[in-house]
Image (cartoon, rainbow, N blue to C red):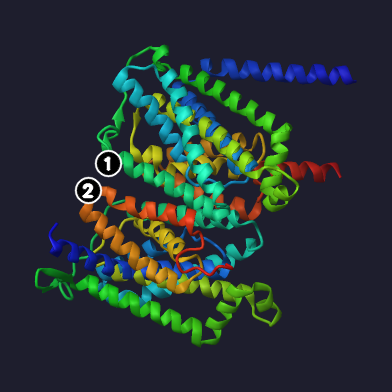
Amino acid sequence: MFKKSIANSLFLWFGLILIVILLPFFLPPYFIHVLVMILFYAYLGTSWNILGGYAGQFSFGHAAFFGIGAYASTLAFVNWGISPWLGMILGGLLGMLLGLLIGSLCFHYGLRGPYFALATLAFSELLRLISLNLDLTGKAMGILIPLKGNAPFSFQHESKIFYYFVILLMFIGVLWITRCIDKGKFGDYFTAIREDEDSAEAIGVDTFAYKLLAILISGFLTALGGTFYAQYFLYIDPAITFGVGNSIEIFLRPIVGGMGTVYGPLIGASVLGPLGEVTRGLLGGYQGVHLMIYGAILVSVIIFLPNGIYGWLRSLKKKHRD
Amino acid sequence: MDTNILVQAIISGLLMGGIYALVAVSLNLIFGVMKIINFAHGAFMMLGMYVTYWVSVFLDIHPYLSLLLSMSVLFVVGFLIQYGLINRIIEAPEHNQLLLTLGVALFLENLALFLWTPNYRMIKVTTFAGAVHVGKVMFSTPRMIAFGAALTMTLLLYLFLTKTDSGKAIRAISQDREGAHVIGINLKMIYSLAFGIGSACVAAAGTMITPFFYITPTVGLVFVITAFVIVVLGGLGSFWGAFFGALIVGVAESLGEVLLSGSLKQVPIYSIFILTLLFRPKGLFGKRHV
């Protein structure tokens, strides 16, 4: 019995891995693009989730980290010809540095809840304004990344399959990190801070250190996502990188899917991605329709599924068992 | 630097600050009562502006004449959103309420985009237009009228909150929710009333600026973020804090426009914002115990 269930789950995992690897080779480019976008937002959502979901520090300005990553690798590539793969690491480190700045300021002065949310929003807006006014960042015109054709060492390829595997690996990486947090003692400290910061402090959790740790990890990972975006679309500007809209896109999926859970962001991305594509397909002539639907979904989820889709599924399963 | 330019900048800043005051004070009213940071506040302002726009286009009347209509429409919209949506999750964690209003804002802004396109619209006015010149300093007439109306509205709101029974109930709730409930105040009704009034006030601000401000579905975002800065500067929940904070921010923005180029004008505002959050999170005028 026991052996059979292990064999079964091994078989299931093997099948799943096989499908994920082979799938893009059988799909037309458009569907690969849809998958890339799902994985991309699942990646960003999972990165946000470490700070916003697990540690309970609701960031409204994750676009700041995203933009730092996107501009760092792009400027290094365009100006000095440094490979975006190296630029990506550089961007991640700068994202971490920004996290250190925002985190040490906000957490030192005890900003919580909506105050922290507004402060992160202010930081991302400041960066947007700065990038909008610097010659270095191309101002409102943004930066076009020169085409290199099939150049995997320059993080570029004509086939979308290349990007599919890059973002797949990135997503698996961030999923693994989240699982470690979820199962490990960091996760317990993060949850304690989220549930009741004062009590966590009282029982001896160094809340400042753990919140800072969460923002450093989250900032690093989100910045890597910025580089991926830049290399995938080969164009960035201040609004799409640092804009409020981008921050909203980043935290929308984990909220819809389930904050503070390992798979919540992936579920949110898997629901919102295709839905956005369908509405764009049906009503493509009209701007903003998919965002209107996202707004309605956000309202419905908050009212009816306060723990997200994942939380809802789990409560269904529990009810079923009882 | 020419002193005339500086004086002009300060005057323009104060006039705009009056509008910000009405937006921020009504945002603060909602925060004070429900403890909700209302992201949809800007979207309500935008709707108020569109009500005014369509009325003045179809009936060919001066935008000011639609003031009562846009206020009533937005009162109903605000009342219903609080009554039907936010009241259901009033006990939920803070960020859920914030996200709910964000969802409402996303929905309304993109509905407007869908219905009315992203085109920038202007209302041309011939009466109450122009400007008054005092020496080399110019006072734009529509801006002065908007300033006067916003101040009047802010004062009326203050009188409503301090002199009427409903207003006193609103203040009672913002000071002690449980206590107010014990003495028999219908919390959900008062919440809805407060939200409706807040929305009507921001709609009034929207209507009054249409003679000199473009109308587009995302126009509210500019104002709502500025209003966040103001209420944090003045102290979340503090009426006069928001009022004076608005005048300070108006002048800071206007001076920023003169001294810094282009969109950098907003940098001082965000810097003020971050510094206040860090060093005086209760705001300049906020009560210590909030």
Which of the two residues, A77 or B240, is positioned nearer the viewer here? B240
Q: Is residue B230 visible?
A: yes
Label 1, secondary structure: give it: helix
How many angstroms separate mark 1 from mark 2 (CA)? 8 Å
Give how far across and how far down residue A313 sits, in percent: 71, 42
Q: Quadrant of the N terminus of chain A?
A: top right
- Share a chain, discs 1 and 2? no
Q: Chain of mark 1?
A: A
Which of the two residues, B263 or B224, is positioned nearer the viewer here? B263
- Mark 2 neighbour density, 10 Å: few (under 14) some (14–19) many (20 or more): few
**Quadrant of the rendered image containing residue A88:** top left
Q: Is residue A270 visible?
A: no
For the point 44% across and 79% down, the residue is: B157
Give how far across and how far down residue A96 sits, in percent: 50, 32
For the point 42% across and 17% down, the residue is: A155
**Quadrant of the rendered image containing residue B269:** bottom left
Label 2, secondary structure: give it: loop
**Image: A298 above or below B234:** above
The residue at which mark 2 appears reads as B261
Q: Amino acid at mark 2?
A: Ser
Task: Determine whether, in the image, residue B130 is placed left or right of residue A13.
Answer: left
**Quadrant of the rendered image containing residue B234:** bottom left
**Image: B198 above or below A122:** below
Task: Determine whether, in the image, residue A213 is placed left or right of residue A180.
Answer: left
The residue at which mark 1 appears reads as A133
